[in-house]
Image (tube, helix red, strand yellow):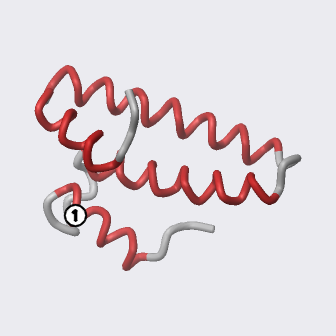
Amino acid sequence: MPLAKEKKAAIISQYGGNAQNTGSIEGQIALITERMAQISAHLQQNKKDFSTHRGLMQLVGKRRRLLNYLQKHNLEGYRSLIEKLGIRK
């Protein structure tokens, strides 16, 4: 189930500056993290849903690539974002 518009706008404004700044790296990472949490909850109930598991692994890789980009270009932003989101590195 996709994120609601209001929830998506709230996440973008919290991490990306304002609700219209959907292209910010921080906002994209926060959205992917929220989607990953939803998919993980789904997979706990549906253990044999392998296609959703594959989608989750793709999201993990995408978030990892975005985090690597952020780390190379804005180290302080990277550190504050993983602290806010509770991502372990």
In the image, residue 74 above or below residue 45: above
Q: 77 or 88: nearer the eye?
A: 88
Dividing the image into 4 quarters, which one contains the N terminus? bottom right
- Residue 87 location in percent, x, y? 39, 39
Dividing the image into 4 quarters, which one contains the C terminus?
top left
Residue for point 47% across, 76% down: 4
Q: Is residue 16 left or right of residue 82?
A: left
Farthest right residue? 48
Tell me if residue 47 comes above or below residue 61 in the rendering.
below
Q: Is residue 29 left or right of residue 69?
A: right
| Disc 1: which residue | 14
> Which three-letter amino acid code belongs to the residue tagged 1?
Gln
* Mark 1 element type: helix
Q: Residue at x 28, y 52 (%)?
A: 27
Image location (x, y in percent) of residue 47: 84, 49
Q: Residue at x 24, y 43 (%)?
A: 81
